[in-house]
Image (tube, helix red, strand yellow):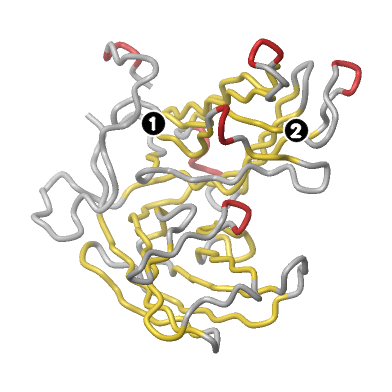
Amino acid sequence: MDFHRNVPHEETTEFGPKSFTYGPVPFEAKSDDTAQVYSVTVKGIKPELGFQWPLDVYGFVAVRDNLDCKRNIIFRRDRNNCQRLTAEDSALVLTGPNRAVLAEDIMNFEVELRVKGSRESEDKILSFLVIEQNCILATSSYGKLYRETHTNKYCTTELLFSQLRDAVEATVDVKVVEGSWSQDFCLQFIARTKSFPDVDFVLFDPRGGMVVSDEGVIQLSRSVVTVESDGELQLTVEARGPGSSAVVISDTVSLTPKRFGTTDECLNVGFCKMEVCVSWSLLLPFF
């Protein structure tokens, strides 16, 4: 990664999704190798240092690539909006990336998490680390799922991600077009790719709280996913009963990637139908 660009350390990426969905598509735009981040989990907290479940956690997780060397946020919460982690449920509710993550050179993952105390002066550092991934050396391991675990004196942090070869960006939007979402069910949206059919990329995490606009638009936890240009993207909606892990009803659609434009599909869970619009885009090359 070129750190000689004089990029302010705390700046976030200025690029967003759907760069070339509607054109014009510049000659330099292309399908490219990308990183897919599935989860970030806190494990193995140290009771001897005063940590006890549950934990009210805030901070950020970001990834830097060589497009602009700026933070691409995949989790961020401030002190007034902590996520409660428990021993049984200690994965962060991810909200990014804001755009596809390039995996052509060096990627850096940054994790900075704190535990909220009764007052700000009593807040404690939970995880503070940088994880470097040399994507060039990893090209022989396409199809491999990376489970990076890093332990400090406070806890163990686990990062689950993969590298996808020759991928395009897909931005997912969902809207209820018939019926309405029932409060009797817990909703989850999941994306899967052909190369990792058993690994869930969670687009909507019910732990984050469901928000539906007056127009029926569902606010997804994450909307940007990448998929190999010669692969397949599966989108699934699952409905569970409150407090239950059993899926009551589900529906899945499979989509063939495009280089630009959109694909419209429909998901049906009985009590409501949802329109899914996937916006495809080639990727910006790094400079």
Determine the residue located farthest toward the right in the rendered image: 48
Identified by mark 2, the residue type is Leu
Instruction: Kindly identify which residue carries mark 1.
Output: 65
Q: Is residue 204 above or below residue 242?
A: above
Tag 1, which secondary structure? loop
Identity of the residue drawn at 61% across and 35% down: 82
Q: Quadrant of the N terminus?
A: top left
Label 2, label 1: how many angstroms apart (C-alpha)? 30 Å
> Dot 1, how many residues are within 10 Å of its Cα: few (below 14), some (14-19), or many (20+)?
many
Q: Is residue 117 above or below residue 223?
A: above
Residue 155's tag is: none
Identified by mark 1, the residue type is Asp
Horizontal side of 60 relative to 277 (left or right) equals right
Rendering quarter of residue 116: top right
Identity of the residue drawn at 53% across and 61% down: 195
Residue closer to the observer: 84 or 16: 84
Residue 172 point in image, percent of width and height: 38, 62
Residue closer to the observer: 6 or 215: 215
Residue 55's tag is: 2
Residue 50 point in image, percent of width and height: 85, 19
> Dot 2, how many residues are within 10 Å of its Cα: few (below 14), some (14-19), or many (20+)?
many
Residue closer to the observer: 43 or 31: 43
Residue 227 point in image, percent of width and height: 42, 59
In terms of sequence position, does the residue under pointer 2 or pointer 1 come before the other? 2
Q: Quadrant of the C terminus?
A: top left
Identity of the residue drawn at 83% across and 42% down: 87
